[in-house]
Image (cartoon, rainbow, N blue to C red):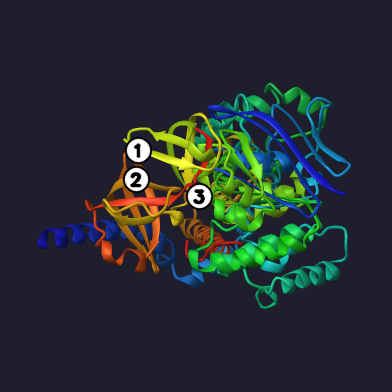
Amino acid sequence: MALLRVEAHTRLGDFDLALDVEVGAGACLALAGPSGAGKTTTLRVAAGLIRPDRGNVTCGDEVWLDTERGVNLPPERRRCGYVFQDYALFGHLRAWQNVAYPLRGIPRAQRRRTAHELLERFGLASRADAHPRTLSGGERQRVALARALAREPRALLLDEPLSALDTRTRTSAGRELAAILREAAVPTLLVTHDFAEAALFGDEVGVIDGGRVVQRGTPSELAMAPASAFVADFTGAVVLIGEARPGPDGLTVVNLDAAEATVLSTDQGHGRVAVSVFPWEIALLPAGSDPVGSAQNRLAAEVVSVTVVGNRVRVGLDAGQPITAEVTQAGVEGLALAPGVKVAASWKAAATRLAEA
Amino acid sequence: MSGSRGFRALLVAALGAVLVFLTVPIVGVFVNVPPGELLASLAQEGALEALLLSLQTTALALVIILVVGTPAAYLLATRSFRGRSVAVTLVELPLVLPPAVAGIALLAALGPEGILGGLLIDAGVQLVFQTAGVVVALVFVASPFYIRQAQAAFASIDPTLLAASRTLGAGEGRTFLAVAIPTARAGLLSGMALAWGRALGEFGATLIFAGSFQGITQTAPLAILARFGIDFTGALALSAVLVALSATILLSVKLLAGSPAFGGVAAR
């Protein structure tokens, strides 16, 4: 089975990229991390657009790069489909001509037919003669994808596939792309700065920071058991830093920094830890009200900001360390939330995860 | 309010002055002598010959400039290498050289007594006082106009497009021909127009390096000079044709560059 393996060691700005990832056939690994973490560089190394100081790229039984043995195939000899962040469509060619560009060595009529068939599969049959500048963002993305697939690549590389789209088309384009990726039987390496996007596409997500994969797992594994404060923060959780010690009933007690407060967790931990909890697991109660249950955490906090998002309310809080809570409108009706109001933030010990700080 | 109106009037007046100053001489070329007389003087011996020679030599020079200059400009635009800025300066040097100096320099290099003259004679190549010499002079003075423009056009291509072409299975050669050139087309065409215009008007370097022999090296501008003292109407007639020719080149390039069919962007 075809397997894509990318190992790269190279200087990147002010840190070293040191990566070794592999993706199985038909699987999608989403590398997720902040900008400048080395995500795009990894794709460019795989495609042969950058030569790392030291590295290895293999796809199935083909060696694309082996710096030790002096092997370095040029991009055109690596059969990989690369979808660039801004899609990089050729402006002087029509949509079908863009798709036909990688089709070489076959009769013209057949090239045309193959390109049209691909466009039809992506629902773009009627736009085949359009020039890229007259296509919408979503259409451009699909033309770029069709073009990348036209070469029947042995691996797919996708750079922030949704970032050039407006928020309206992003959801539908994301769903379609996820379906296409499931269909494609080749290993796919996708990079994104957005954890939700990574979770949507990736069978597995590798969180990348400072040129290294800091944790790799299924999206839910990362969310449920983040290995570090960085990963927890990246998955969208609230992260609090403190000092852990064993507590009663097998629970762990964490003394939070910069707050006269402790929280309980069902996770094990000791020393410096990152406490993480998802914003939607936090309930807001009137200040000074009684704890609801024994395994319940409770922090006195002051409201800093209130943002209404649909039928939910995102509340920024200061509890010595910043906290964000996401609650329903109904759940906070009696609280009269406004900056300066004092409340209590509460969540279960079981929803409290501990990770390396 | 009145201040800004005054300023606008100033801008309009400046543009008006520019337009009048630049177009009145050209209008003069056409209206000074009745059209019938202009046409008749074109029929004179040597006039059409000079025009034809101008067209032939500039076309040949342009082909040479395009074939050699385009890849050279691509290299300058897309790679960084040691000595690149020196190379760029050397390419631009003929731009600031007075044409007469260019002619003398060509003689000193390629003339019978020039530093490469011996080599050329051994190879059986004769340039001085020959049509080939005209082409050499034209290439020398006109190529920097094209190469500079082409270099800028190639440099402004989004490098991702070139990378995309490579990942789609095209080697560097095909990427250059199928992506870089069409993408840079508008810039290349305007460089072509500049170089062609410069070549059509070339005068000093050609006169010194190739001379002014009717039918061999006497291009239209040289024929105008030859006529100027003895047959002003004839000189005017040739000038009128040159003006028309230059305007046609400029206009057709603008249309081509602006046409979406040629990769141009109409709005820009």
Considering only order in the chain, which callout, 2 or 1, is on the residue closer to the N terminus? 1
Local secondary structure at mark 2:
strand
| Three-letter amino acid code at the position of disc 3 | Ala
The answer to whether mark 1 and mark 2 are in CB contact below 8 A is: yes
B107 or A195, nearer to the observer: A195
Tell me if B112 is positioned left or right of B87 in this view.
right
Residue under label 1 = A261
Considering only order in the chain, which callout, 1 or 3, is on the residue closer to the N terminus? 1
- Count residues near mark 2 (Cα–Cα under 10 Å), then give few for <14, some for 14-19, many for 20+: many
**Dot label at residue A165:** none
| Three-letter amino acid code at the position of disc 2 | Leu
Asked if residue A104 can be seen in this view, the reply is yes
Local secondary structure at mark 3:
helix
A289 or A7, nearer to the observer: A289
Provide residue B118's location: percent of width, then percent of height.
76, 23
Considering only order in the chain, which callout, 2 or 3, is on the residue closer to the N terminus? 2
Label 3 – label 1 distance at C-alpha: 17 Å
Label 1 – label 2 distance at C-alpha: 7 Å
Residue furthest to the bottom: A126
Residue under label 3 = A351
**Dot label at residue A299:** 2
Q: Is residue B186 above or below residue B133?
A: below
| Three-letter amino acid code at the position of disc 1 | Ala
Local secondary structure at mark 1:
loop
Asked if residue B260 can be seen in this view, the reply is no
Provide residue B7's location: percent of width, then percent of height.
18, 57
Find residue A38 and report its image quarter: top right
